[in-house]
Amino acid sequence: MKLIIINGPNLNLLGKREPEVYGNETFETYFPLLKAKFKEIELEYYQSNIEGELIDKIQEVGFSYDGIILNAAAYTHTSVGIGDAVKAVLTPVVEVHISNTFSREEFRHHSYISSGAKGVVLGFGLQSYALAILSFLQE
Ligand code: DQA
């Protein structure tokens, strides 16, 4: 099984960025732990701060991979383009958020991704990514 985690803007700053919301761990230290936990999965990771690059990556992997785990970060709440890309591809997309976006500001309550996603996991810190991977294993 081949899965990819795609992270959007500012998630390259995990560990430094608002640690009270997003924790102290960087994704670069968490990703190898995830790979070790799910050895049977071919797991890739991609991050970009640029909307079009995220769309390009979704299109690139979206007809051949078994799953996309997408944290579009702030673009979740603004990007019709990423929402359309999620709907355009054949690979199922699980939307992930580290924080519970519904317990935060109102503008974070709407997602352009959710309607095209297979499911949504949010609010469990970095563990949200592990739970999203598990959802692909339990089919
Ligand atoms: C986030 C939530 C978004 O509202 C925010 O803009 C992010 C991160 C999360 O993982 O909790 O950058 O997607």
Image (cartoon, rainbow, N blue to C red):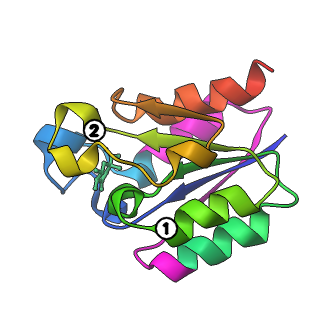
In the rendered view, tell whether residue 130 sits above or below residue 73: above
The amino acid pointed to by label 2 is: Thr
Ligand 1 near label 2 (Cβ, under 8 Å)? yes
The picture places residue 98, in percent across and down from the top left corner, at: 35, 39
Q: Nearer the viewer, residue 123 or 78?
A: 78
From the viewer's perspective, tell me whether residue 86 is left or right of residue 136: left
> Can you identify the residue that label 1 sits on?
80
| Quadrant holding the C terminus | top right
In the rendered view, tell whether residue 59 sits above or below residue 19: below
| Quadrant holding the N terminus | top right
> Can you identify the residue that label 2 sits on?
101
The amino acid pointed to by label 1 is: Val
Q: Nearer the viewer, residue 26 or 17?
A: 17
Between discs 2 and 1, the one toward the N terminus: 1
Q: Nearer the viewer, residue 62 or 79?
A: 79
From the viewer's perspective, tell me whether residue 41 is left or right of residue 107: right
In the rendered view, tell whether residue 108 sits above or below residue 52: above
Rendered residue at 65%/24% (across/down)? 134
Is 46 inside the magenta-drawn segment?
yes
Q: CA distance from mark 2 to mark 1?
A: 18 Å
Residue extent of the magenta highlight: 30-52
Q: Which of the 4 image quadrants contains residue 39?
A: top right
Can residue 46 be seen by looking at this rendering? no
Circle 1 sits in a helix, a strand or a loop, which is it?
A: helix
Rendered residue at 41%/49% (across/down)? 111
The picture places residue 70, in percent across and down from the top left corner, at: 54, 51
Q: Nearer the viewer, mark 2 or mark 1?
A: 1
Can residue 92 be seen by looking at this rendering? yes
From the viewer's perspective, tell me whether residue 70 is left or right of residue 118: left
Dot 1 crowding, Cα within 10 Å, few <14, some 14–19, many 20+: some
